[in-house]
Image (tube, rainbow, N blue to C red):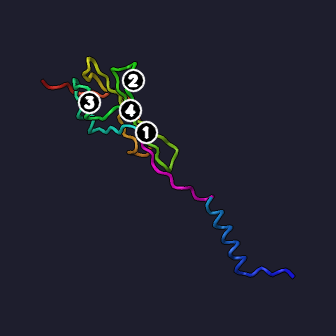
């Protein structure tokens, strides 16, 4: 004689099946990923034409990319990926030197991670001349 299935065991089996299928409906938590050099507008406002490499490094930090073949250029790259989306926002600031003095600054001016739908635009940033 086969044992009859009891009502509590049937409910337990249904609850277990529902619990296992519920995992496929919810996405796991993903953290925000920030990589590179975060450079904000306050830091950029401190830069002046004619600053030495050491002064620029003090204000902006060590550049992410300091190419041996282009020693007169430092690149500060920042990437931000929000965990809840696949969109990656990137900001690039390039500092150019002439005779080891800062000559000009180029790059993106919109801050990643700020507004959700911001598309960064590259432009040349005017840097004030050093006062003598």
Residues under numbered marks 4 and 1 in contact, where contact means CB atoms less than 8 Å apart: no
Q: Residue at image x 51%, y 47%? A: 85
Q: Earlier in the sequence, mark 2 or mark 1?
A: 2
The CA distance from mark 3 to mark 2 is 16 Å
For the residue labelled by badge 2, is the local secondary structure a helix, a strand or a loop? loop
Which of 63 and 85 lies nearest the eye of the viewer? 63
Determine if the magenta segment contains residue 20.
Answer: no
Q: Which residue is mark 2?
A: 67
Residues under numbered marks 4 and 2 in contact, where contact means CB atoms less than 8 Å apart: no
* 2 vs 1, front mark: 2
Q: Quadrant of the N terminus?
A: bottom right
Q: Earlier in the sequence, mark 3 or mark 2?
A: 3
Q: Which residue is mark 3?
A: 56
Q: Is residue 97 left or right of residue 70?
A: left
Q: Is residue 106 above or below residue 6?
A: above
For the residue labelled by badge 3, is the local secondary structure a helix, a strand or a loop? helix
Q: Which residue is mark 4?
A: 64
Q: Earlier in the sequence, mark 4 or mark 3?
A: 3
Determine if the magenta segment contains residue 27.
Answer: yes
Q: Which residue is mark 1?
A: 79
Q: Quadrant of the C terminus?
A: top left
Q: Which residues are magenta?
A: 24-35
């Amino acid at each position: 004689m086969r044992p009859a299935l009891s009502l509590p065991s049937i409910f337990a089996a249904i609850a277990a099946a529902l619990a296992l299928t519920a995992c496929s409906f919810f996405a796991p938590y993903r953290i925000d990923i920030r990589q590179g050099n975060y450079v904000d507008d306050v830091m950029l406002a401190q830069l002046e034409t004619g600053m030495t490499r050491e002064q620029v490094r003090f204000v902006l930090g060590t550049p992410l990319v300091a190419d041996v073949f282009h020693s007169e250029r430092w690149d500060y790259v920042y990437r931000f990926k929000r965990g809840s989306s696949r969109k990656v926002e990137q900001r690039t600031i390039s500092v150019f030197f002439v005779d080891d003095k800062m000559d000009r600054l180029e790059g993106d001016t919109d801050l990643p991670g700020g507004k959700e739908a911001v598309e960064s635009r590259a432009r040349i940033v005017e840097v004030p001349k050093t006062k003598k």
